[in-house]
């Protein structure tokens, strides 16, 4: 009876199941959450199962995603699995999670945030200043395009889609002179070395949520909420509350380039936000701080202030 070795993996019944996309980045993130939960709950990693779910975003991939319906595309099928009870929690890049979640679901916590900066990947040179006039930069991000054009109106920004490996290859092959990628994603894929320069948030603001891994679950699932609370990073949660409230106060058109970054500084949270016209010729910025308990309110107020003060063309109205 006591012959079965205690570490027999087959004997471990999963007590929680993580739903995730199957991309290398998504799997890295799911494994990070699995490892954190396994340590916090003192269960073997096998007790936290990982279920890969194919999303419509994965299926469409190369079509114009914004035309096909925007952000929710990479989360819809995973959220359906959450609501059906097929998975208990879902792990996403916070940046890719829409501001409005399906009823009954919430973001219950975040892993400690990684470096928020965008990385510049150059074919040649060490920084933005090394790019000659007319150099071709590939990106699919309106936010990166608009900020680049604002800093360097002389560059040619063109559409470059695909996963991180594809984009790096197109710079290496000379199809583009440069691209921009989140340092966090590069690092997770073991490709941080590909970064030629890191852009200071003071002149190039990241996307809301960049660098953070979000964990979503059913609001009415106390066990899973408690498990997530055991691994959640408080400061990341405060920053993301401010950033996501800011974004949701401005949302409306997913064609509007928006950037935002909040940081916890002692008992305060500081939020910087930016809205631009796609060609970078005009922009409206805001910076404000509030006690950390008011993080979400700070985001909402900053969004509302920009909305009221920014020229209509900035908001794609
Ligand atoms: N939009 C795709 C996406 N979603 C999350 C990351 C990287 C990780 C992160 O920003 O947290 C990336 C790639 C990129 O923007 O370079």
Image: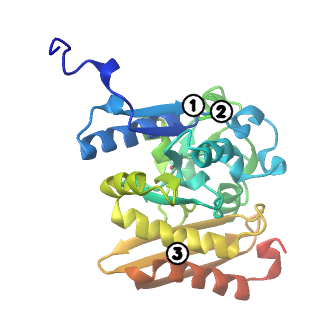
Q: Secondary structure at mark 1?
A: loop
Residue placed under numbered mark 1 in the picture: 22
Q: Residue at x 81, y 80 (%)?
A: 312
**Is the distance from the Cβ of mark 2 to the nearest ligand 1 atom less than 8 Å?**
no
Q: Position of residue 246 (x, y in %)?
A: 59, 74
Q: Nearer the viewer, residue 168 or 175?
A: 168
Which labelled disc corresponds to residue 272? 3
Residue 58 against residue 148 in the figure, above or below: above
- Does residue 128 appear left or right of residue 50 in this picture? right
For label 1, being within 8 Å of ligand 1 is answered: no
Q: Which residue is tagged 2?
A: 54
Mark 1 and mark 3: Cα distance apart in space: 33 Å
- Residue 47 higher or lower than 256, as above or below: above
* Horizontal side, residue 83 vs residue 226: left or right: right
Nearest to N terminus: mark 2 or mark 1: 1
Cα separation, mark 2 vs mark 1, equals 7 Å
* Label 3, ligand 1: CB separation under 8 Å: no
Q: Earlier in the sequence, mark 1 or mark 3?
A: 1
């Amino acid at each position: 009876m006591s012959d079965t070795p205690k570490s027999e993996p087959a004997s471990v019944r999963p007590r929680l199941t993580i739903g995730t996309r199957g991309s290398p980045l998504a799997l890295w993130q799911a494994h990070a959450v699995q490892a954190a939960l396994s340590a916090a709950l003192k269960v073997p990693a096998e007790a936290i199962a990982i279920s890969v779910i194919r999303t419509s975003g994965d299926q469409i991939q190369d079509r114009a995603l914004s035309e096909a319906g925007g952000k929710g595309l990479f989360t819809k099928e995973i959220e359906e699995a959450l609501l059906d009870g097929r998975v208990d929690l879902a792990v996403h890049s916070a940046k890719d999670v829409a501001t409005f979640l399906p009823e009954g679901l919430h973001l219950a916590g975040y892993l400690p945030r990684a470096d928020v900066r965008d990385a510049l990947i150059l074919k040649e040179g060490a920084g933005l200043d090394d790019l000659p006039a007319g150099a071709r930069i590939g990106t699919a991000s309106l936010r990166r395009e608009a900020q680049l054009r604002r800093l360097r109106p002389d560059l040619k920004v063109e559409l470059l889609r695909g996963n991180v490996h594809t984009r790096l290859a197109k710079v290496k092959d000379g199809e583009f002179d440069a691209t921009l990628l989140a340092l966090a994603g590069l690092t997770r894929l073991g490709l941080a070395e590909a970064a030629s320069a890191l852009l200071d948030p003071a002149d190039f603001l990241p996307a809301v949520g960049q660098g953070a891994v979000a964990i979503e679950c059913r609001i009415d699932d106390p066990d899973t909420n408690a498990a997530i609370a055991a691994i959640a990073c408080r400061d990341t949660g405060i920053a993301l509350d401010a950033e996501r409230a800011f974004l949701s106060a401005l949302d409306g058109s997913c064609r509007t380039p928006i950037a935002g970054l909040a940081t916890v500084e002692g008992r305060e949270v500081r939020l910087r936000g930016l809205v631009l016209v796609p060609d970078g010729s005009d922009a409206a910025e805001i910076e404000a701080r509030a006690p950390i308990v008011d993080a979400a309110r700070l985001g909402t107020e900053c969004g509302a202030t920009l909305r009221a003060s920014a020229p209509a063309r900035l908001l794609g109205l």
